[in-house]
């Protein structure tokens, strides 16, 4: 296996579209600022930032260094100019739990709260914490990923609003635990554009 830095150099982008990448890097996710690949035959992943977002690489790695905690967040193994190497987390996101009907338990929610409080204790402002950024690992751990916005100063109520709807609706005995992706995405968009009534939170 070639060094990860050499593999990263072979990844090409056109703006936010991936043009090519070596077979040793398996695409597992794309976001607004970066693409994430699993490094074949390892327990590592690499987050590679798009050319227009390369400055965010150093910002996010500095946040992970500040957290320095692999109990609630993935471990970090190395970094380069436009990427960093992190622990590959085998599991499913809370978003996938909703899609598949896997119950999100109060203990899982409590673990997210603990992670958020830990980040605050390090002087950070946890932000942009949503269902796709929370992973239930195959070992039953709950970990947060994508901490790029943990240094923003404005208040982010996303997690508090999720918790409020969890307590008010999801925990009801007969409330469905499985939803079609289309319905979830519709709710996400309504929330994003502030079209949901505040009374539900």
Image: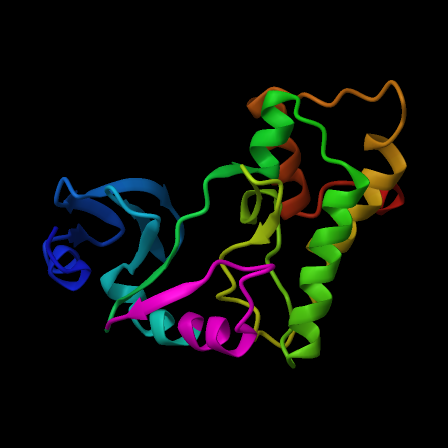
Position in image of residue 161 (x %, y %): 77, 50
In the picture shown, does residue 60 fall above or below 101? below
Position in image of residue 46 (x %, y %): 30, 55
Residue 182 highlighted magenta (yes or no) = no
Determine whether, in the image, residue 60 is placed left or right of residue 70: left
Determine whether, in the image, residue 1 is placed left or right of residue 73: left
* Residue 197 visible in image: no
The count of marks equals 0
Q: Residue at x 66, y 21 (%)?
A: 101
Which is more toward the observer, 37 or 131?
Answer: 37
Q: How is the image coloured?
A: rainbow
Q: Residue at x 16, y 63 (%)?
A: 5
Q: Residue at x 89, y 44 (%)?
A: 199
Q: Residue at x 45, y 62 (%)?
A: 75
Q: Quadrant of residue 122?
A: bottom right
Q: Quadrant of residue 60?
A: bottom left
In the picture shown, does residue 159 fall above or below 131? below
Position in image of residue 61 (x %, y %): 41, 72
Position in image of residue 18 (x %, y %): 20, 45
Magenta highlight range = 60-80
In the picture shown, does residue 107 fall above or below 100? below
* Residue 99 visible in image: yes
User: Going by the picture, which residue comes out furthest to the bottom?
Assistant: 123
């Amino acid at each position: 296996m070639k060094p990860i830095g050499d593999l990263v150099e072979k990844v090409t982008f056109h703006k936010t579209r991936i043009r090519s990448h070596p077979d040793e890097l398996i695409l597992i996710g794309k976001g607004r600022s970066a693409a994430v690949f699993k490094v074949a035959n390892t327990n590592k992943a690499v987050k590679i930032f798009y050319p227009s977002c390369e400055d965010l690489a150093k910002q996010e790695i500095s946040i992970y260094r500040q957290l320095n905690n692999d109990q609630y967040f993935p471990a970090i193994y190395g970094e380069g100019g436009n990427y960093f190497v992190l622990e590959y987390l085998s599991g499913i996101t809370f978003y996938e739990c909703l899609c598949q009907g896997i119950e999100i338990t109060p203990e899982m929610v409590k673990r997210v709260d603990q992670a958020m409080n830990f980040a605050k204790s390090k002087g950070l402002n946890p932000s942009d914490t949503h269902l796709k950024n929370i992973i239930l690992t195959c070992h039953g751990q709950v970990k947060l990923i994508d901490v790029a916005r943990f240094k923003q100063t404005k208040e982010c109520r996303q997690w508090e609003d999720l918790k409020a709807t969890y307590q008010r609706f999801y925990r009801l005995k007969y409330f469905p635990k499985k939803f079609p992706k289309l319905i979830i995405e519709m709710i996400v968009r309504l929330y994003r554009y502030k079209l949901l009534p505040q009374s539900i939170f």
